[in-house]
Amino acid sequence: MTLENSTPPPGRSAEWEATLAEAFGEVLGRPLAEHGDADARYGAYYGGNFLDEAELDHDPVWVGRAALAGEQTVGPGDLLLTPPGDTAETELVFDASRSLFWVDPRELPDTLAAFGADLAAAVAASEGGQWRGALLGAELGRIAGHHGVDLASADLSRELWTLWQGRIASGDTLLDALRAATGLTDASSPELVPAGLGDSADEVAEEAHELVAGVADPALRDYLAAFCDEESHDLALVRFAPADVDEDEEEGDDEEDDFPDEDYGDDYDDDDFDDYDESQGGTVVVRWDGAVDQYEVTVRRVIA
């Protein structure tokens, strides 16, 4: 499904999809249709220091055969997406096959030298691509399967692989990724929007509520306000100006005018957005920094 497609996924009405798309447009500061073409693909990713500190980046659940093949999702149970005051904690569910891993073949015994050589070749091939040396779980699983290696085996060093970015399970549209990043994947109607801010509403800055003041549905408006606070220590919003996708034009542009105001309407303000950043792969659309930079949830335009 693309944003232009009027046929919503099973269980979702076209009216509700339009309501969500409009609401997320308020969060991002511009309509979703202004982010890429209709066939562009997006994903929501969870990463940051918390994965390492909680030792979740080496949990074998990520590298089971079925998980890496995309045959089953991963629910670690310790990764929650909880806006301030939300009483219905949303447990995140991941797609390990499309998650991203750092791999160190040097941790392999000599008996698995051929496996290590194939891993090293895959990492080298990835160096100049979108993920800068990280491997998709599906590729990691394919190589392991070819050599008959069980990555979840206790006999292998856990330092062989490290989860870098867990992809939250979702479809490929920008709306799908935004739903996943904000815990709204299962909200197929207004009645299924998670609990609002309750007694903690005062913890969300007034400016955050103003960003979504135009959202008609009150439950959705209240819920998304928690994802619009740029100063929050719980879940801070970081918006990005979109990159110019025409490389020929980029080469001729003045560096200080990469994002001219006229491209985004009268309401566009350079100060509302961080600079475009692709330093960690993919075109970054929006990010939320949680628990004072302990983790981040990032929506990116992706190739795979």
Image: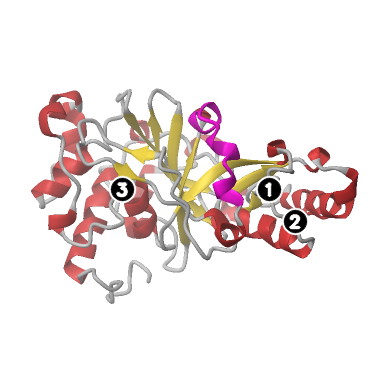
Residue at 15% x, 27% y: name it.
200
Report the number of numbered marks: 3
Residue at 27% x, 50% y: name it.
24
Separation of residues labelled 2 and 1 (CA atoms): 8 Å
Q: Are marks 2 and 1 in contact (CB under 8 Å)?
A: yes
Residue labelled with disc 2? 149
Instruction: Describe the element under mark 3 as helix, strand or loop.
Output: loop
Q: Amino acid at mark 3?
A: Gly
Closer to us: 279 or 181: 181
Q: Eyeballing the image, is 45 above or below 272?
A: below
Q: Quadrant of residue 192?
A: bottom left
Q: Choose mark 2 or mark 3, whichever is in front.
A: 2
Residue labelled with disc 3? 183
Pick whichever of labels 1 and 3 is earlier in the sequence: 1
Q: Amino acid at mark 2?
A: Val
Q: Quadrant of residue 255?
A: top right
Q: Amino acid at mark 1?
A: Ser
Q: Locate residue 267, reporting x and y percent.
A: 25, 42
Q: Choose mark 1 or mark 3, whichever is in front.
A: 1
Q: Are marks 2 and 3 in contact (CB under 8 Å)?
A: no
Pick whichever of labels 2 and 3 is earlier in the sequence: 2
Closer to us: 282 or 69: 69
Residue at 31% x, 56% y: name it.
185
Q: Locate residue 49, reporting x and y percent.
A: 52, 28
Magenta-drawn segment? 50-63
Instruction: Describe the element under mark 2 as helix, strand or loop.
Output: loop
Q: Is residue 236 magenta?
A: no
Residue at 23% x, 64% y: name it.
17
Q: Residues within 10 Å of mark 3 (few under 14, many from 20)?
A: many
Residue labelled with disc 1? 153
**Which quadrant is the C terminus positioned in?**
bottom right
